[in-house]
Image (spheres, rainbow, N blue to C red):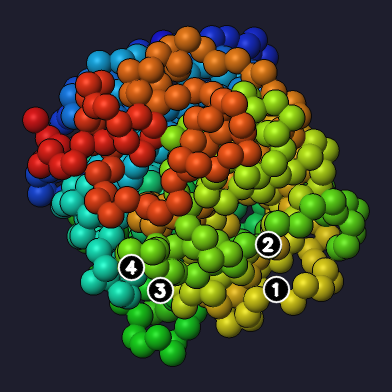
Amino acid sequence: MKSSGVLSLVALSFSTAVKAATVTYDWTATWVWAAPDGVGRPVVGINNAWPCPQIDATVGDTVIINFTNNLGNQTSGLHFHGINQVQTPEMDGPSGVTQCPVPPGSTLQYKFVVDVGGTFWYHSHNMGQYPDGLRGVFLVHDPNDPYAGSYDEEVILTVSDWYHNESLTMVRNMLQPSNTRFAPPIPDGMIINEGAGLNVNFTKGRKYRFRMISFAALASAMIHFDSHDINIIMNDADYLQKEVKYQLRIATAQRYDFIIECIDRDNDNYPFLISLDINRDWTNPDLGPLQWPHNYTGYLTMDYNKPNTKKDVVHKWKPADDSHFKPYDNEAILGGNDTNYDTLIKMDFAFCTDANGYPRACFNNLTYIDQKVPALYSAATTGDDNSNPIVYGQINPFIVNYGDVVQIVVNNQDAATHPFHLHGHHFQVLDRPKTGTGDWSGRDTNYNQKPPRRDTVTVMAHSHAVLRFKATNPGTWLFHCHIEWHVEMGLTATIIEAPDRLRNLTFPQDHLDACNKMGIPVSGNAAGNTQDYLDTTGMVTVPPTVYNGAMYAGSSSKKRGLMGRLASGMGSFFF
């Protein structure tokens, strides 16, 4: 089964009685020239085309992606955002965590079962690469979708900030001692459906399920429809009790499914407005006037003989508070009450500088640093010591036991909002108070007793969020800010979940071959020590001063390990 590009409108055609199938894609990552906003630049495409193709599967299907890297001068890889990878943690995709980067000329197979339905996406999880274009839609159709009879057609709506410069150049400019304000790259614009835009054929009496996905690297987006309610039914591939709202804010990596209905009184072409939110905190007037320089108007078109000239004007953005959405199944707070949980992980986020004076982002005063051995490989090969965080080096590891109810508290000590994502789980959002609330008090009170679930949550400025999940999915799962530039600054932690069940985990040969070609060890502690797992000699404790992103040094390099795989600068990465 092959996929075409991003679709704007697809008819409902899947049955409620579909048997599990195997869905296979053969993909080659290639450089492509594209101009989605009118300015040409190199992008990472698939099979010599961009936008990248869509994945379609049904709950219970096995998805196989044979991924070949033909970029020539960059490593690559894929992460399937929101897919929990139950029993397949080695297929999660982040380089240096669950696999080695895929070097040029190599093929790696991803194979996993999709266990829940919803709207997902995939993207490179390799050294700031996905803003250069390697990302796409991933839909898992659900035969038991509770809203299956509530709409007639589906509409794909992707939104992304867009940059005219290459990621490597922008991150190099960001990671300089002179960047004392920790300023990230600012987007040059916004693209909808990877530049194709969206004009919906709007027919009286029909209902449209929008699947909205943010591919952004930095900025969130606001959306409002002229004269029409937004009937929200899902966030981050988790069903909600339907709520009627008028504005939504979608942060990087988030997804919303909502229904727009063409009712009897409709007789016009109706605009909808999407505004890119580049503000540090849209709720805080003390930061100065809000700015909305990048806007897009799409249309619900009933009459194609009429010109689409009408604009949707929003005088003030006041999006719905997603932390109060209600789960469709009414699942109660994990643990049964506010105070009943097994493990607390508290992370204080603030910007910081490393030993060489370079700008970084820290959890609990420590920035994430890539080590020589991927974390999952260390977990599988260090025996009983794999439950000791020392084994993993400075990847901000937290050990949790199988079956634990885990409470994560994120204290955002920055003046901007930040979206945080957990791999391997959908967490409950127990509390997400407003800007200026301050750090978590340490008191477990007044939590939402039937909290919504999602995999990416916005934490407000100078405030906090309280999250919970149950540790029943052994693996090494990242928890990170999904502003890609902050990932490159080190705003990441690692949940080592059920390490006793990861001992002697085996890896596909093609995954091991990729490591071998890269010169990356596949066993031992973070430094590759296979004799004394608690010996920290050789672990990376300070980030390199030269950022080389995904640049490929070639197999002849004498440097070994994840930190030694990169070139010392190869110019533009477009051939």
- Residue at the image point whose x is 74% and y is 77% from the top: 441
Disc 4 crowd rating (10 Å Cα; few below 14, some 14-19, many 20+) is some
Decide: marks 4, 2 in contact (CB < 8 A)?
no
171 to the left or right of 302:
left
Residues at discs 3 and 4 in contact (Cβ within 8 Å): no
Q: Mark 4 highlights which residue?
A: 357
Dot 1: what SS? loop
The span from disc 2 to disc 3 (Cα, nearest Å) is: 23 Å
> Which residue is under mark 2?
346
Amino acid tagged 4? Gly
Q: Position of residue 319 (x, y in %)?
A: 52, 68
The disc labelled 1 sits on which kind of residue?
Trp
At label 1, counting other C-alpha atoms closer than 10 Å, the crowd grade (few under 14, some 14-19, many 20 or more) is some
Residue 2 in which image quadrant: top left
Identify which residue, 498 or 318, lies in the foreground: 498
Q: CA distance from mark 1 to mark 3?
A: 21 Å
- Please identify, in this view, whether the residue under mark 2 or under mark 1 is nearer the observer: 2
Mark 1 lies on residue: 440
User: Separation of disc 4 and disc 2 at Cα?
Assistant: 26 Å
User: Which image quadrant for residue 380?
Assistant: top right
**For residue 128, above or below residue 28:** below
* Residue at position x 36%, y 39% in the image: 563
Mark 2 touches mark 1? (CB < 8 Å): yes
Q: Is residue 383 left or right of residue 460?
A: right
